[in-house]
Image (tube, rainbow, N blue to C red):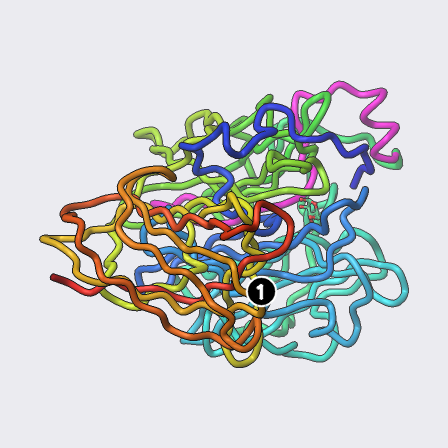
């Protein structure tokens, strides 16, 4: 892991200038090292959490978001953090969650009290938790820094494989309980044929980067999966300057691996690392990766981005370029049910928080901010809008507009003091405007005699009534 200087967002330095942006898909927090998982027709993405303003990967927690449509992402908060693992001390790095027999196993890596990196596993009955450390101790600890970036795949015969490693690549066959192994840990031999390049052993990453020009090489962030009987290992590879996303394939889950090339390289991601995951959902294939393109972000402020792609007929993966538009909705959203305010396609000037009583809610709402929700199907017409909001002070206005921040205004709710910032009340506004069909909905935050600075109100959920 190379320490580099924070570079402020370059290409995407203003959110407002990118009204049609969908990437990165989460704007309320940083969301590095995305690991997608599909469960019951819903996409989940498990991420880390870069802390704003630091110059290394000093991370302390892991987050999960979900989406039914690939564009509106619901924040499920922070189900696990370093505190969840009694043996962990720092560096809550890349992780992946997989499902087996209705249980969810979230493989994480973290720094141990003896300053090494180890892999642990938390377990839950639900994809969003609560999770608890399955073992009370690491699953893999070998007294080195090699033990990062776990990826787990369960093969058709039921055998689960755990791959991981920084610069070295290891695997072990997991037992059926997913939290132990009897097998020995195997180091995967690296070669030009397997991973496109070869590091000379015994050299630090700094020396290697200055002295050696790589065609490619295995660095970190493995992502192991199978498609049409072929095993794929995507990983962060290396160009001269920065990481790229590369992949190798095999006809067996344990190799030998054959280098297939770079999937994404030389993109203006504003981040040294790129950590990816690949998954199919509703008949489409997606690449998840991270960039450092939110305002004030960079290599230590990274966010999840998604691109759709199509496999070539022979199963190879095409070159993928990053976009700010991201992906299209694969479903429409029903406004006539309770929708969480923290289900967001794009947002500005707000964040999310959670407490025991309410769960996750939108917080830190400021004048000039907004939430965009994409592809909302109003059908034949609406009569009423309701929102659950809380405010310790008055002065906030929630406007509901169609298709843009200054689009047709459907409703307006003036938020009074509700008895506290977490005392939520449901307020309703009649709708007289005529609206039908599919629209993007904007919740626009305005102040009454408040121009900037203090928070206006918190926002938990919303719904419309049909006409
Ligand atoms: O996020 C911390 C580390 O950076 C991850 O473990 C690596 O994959 C790289 O993305």
Residue 392 figure quarter: bottom right
Report the residue at 26% width, 50% height from top: 410
Query: Is residue 50 one of those drawn in magenta?
Result: no
Task: Point out residue 302 in the picture as x, y percentages from the top left corner.
Answer: 64, 42
Is 241 above or below relative to 273?
A: above
Inspect this view and state whether residue 436 appears. Answer: yes
Report the residue at 68% width, 67% height from top: 81
Task: Point out residue 339 in the picture as x, y percentages from the top left corner.
Answer: 34, 64
Is 59 above or below relative to 319?
A: below
Sort mark 1 into few (<14), some (14-19) or many (20+) by Cα contacts within 10 Å.
some
Please give left or right for residue 198 compared with residue 285 in the image.
right
Is 226 above or below relative to 334?
A: above
Residue 456 figure quarter: bottom right
Report the residue at 77% width, 45% height from top: 53
Report the residue at 80% width, 61% height from top: 90
Please give left or right for residue 173 compared with residue 187 in the image.
left
Task: Point out residue 325 in the picture as x, y percentages from the top left corner.
Answer: 41, 31
Residue sitting farthest toward the left = 380
Span highlighted in magenta in the image: 204-231
Which residue is more in the foreground, 158 or 300?
Answer: 300
Q: Which quadrant is the C terminus positioned in? A: bottom left
Which residue is more in the foreground, 439 or 236?
Answer: 439
Label 1: element kind:
strand
Q: Which quadrant is the N terminus positioned in? A: top right
Q: Which residue is mark 1?
A: 353
Task: Point out residue 372 in the picture as x, y percentages from the top left corner.
Answer: 39, 46
């Amino acid at each position: 892991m190379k320490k580099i200087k924070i570079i402020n967002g370059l290409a995407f330095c203003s959110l407002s200038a990118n009204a049609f942006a969908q990437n990165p898909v989460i704007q309320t927090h940083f969301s590095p090292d995305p690991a997608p998982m599909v469960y019951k027709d819903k996409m989940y993405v498990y991420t880390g959490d870069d802390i704003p303003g630091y110059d290394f990967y000093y991370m302390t927690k892991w987050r999960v978001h979900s989406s039914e449509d690939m564009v509106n992402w619901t924040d499920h908060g922070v189900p696990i953090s370093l505190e969840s693992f009694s043996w962990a001390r720092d560096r809550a790095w890349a992780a992946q969650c997989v499902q087996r027999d209705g249980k969810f196993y979230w493989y994480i890596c973290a720094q141990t009290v003896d300053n090494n990196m180890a892999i642990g596993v938390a377990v839950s009955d639900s994809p969003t938790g609560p999770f608890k450390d399955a073992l009370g101790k690491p699953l893999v600890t070998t007294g080195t820094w090699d033990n990062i970036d776990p990826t787990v795949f369960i093969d058709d015969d039921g055998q689960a494989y755990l791959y991981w490693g920084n610069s070295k690549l290891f695997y072990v066959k997991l037992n059926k309980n997913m939290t132990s192994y009897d097998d020995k840990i195997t180091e995967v031999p690296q070669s030009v044929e397997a991973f496109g390049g070869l590091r000379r052993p015994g050299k630090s990453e700094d020396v290697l980067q200055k002295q050696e020009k790589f065609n490619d090489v295995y660095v970190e962030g493995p992502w192991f999966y199978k498609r049409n009987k072929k095993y794929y290992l995507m990983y962060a590879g290396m160009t001269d300057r920065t990481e790229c996303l590369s992949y190798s394939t095999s006809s067996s889950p344990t190799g030998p691996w054959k280098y297939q090339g770079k999937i994404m390289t030389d993109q203006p991601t504003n981040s040294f690392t790129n950590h990816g995951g690949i998954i199919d959902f509703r008949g489409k294939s997606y690449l998840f990766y991270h960039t450092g393109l939110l305002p004030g972000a960079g290599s230590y402020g990274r966010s999840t981005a998604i691109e759709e792609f199509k496999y070539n007929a022979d199963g190879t993966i095409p070159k993928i370029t990053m976009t700010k538009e991201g992906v299209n909705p694969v479903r429409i959203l029903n406004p006539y049910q309770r929708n969480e305010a923290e289900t967001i396609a794009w947002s500005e000037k707000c964040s999310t928080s959670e407490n025991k009583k309410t769960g996750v809610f939108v917080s830190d709402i400021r004048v000039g901010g907004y939430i965009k929700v994409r592809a909302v199907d109003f059908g034949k017409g609406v009569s009423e809008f309701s929102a659950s909001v809380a405010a310790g002070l008055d002065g906030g206005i929630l406007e509901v507009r169609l298709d843009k921040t200054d689009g047709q205004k459907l409703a307006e709710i003036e938020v009074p003091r509700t008895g506290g910032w977490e005392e939520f009340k449901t307020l309703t506004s009649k709708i007289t405007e005529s609206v039908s069909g599919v629209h993007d909905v904007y919740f626009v935050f305005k102040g009454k005699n408040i121009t900037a600075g203090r928070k206006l109100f918190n926002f938990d959920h919303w719904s419309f009534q049909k006409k």
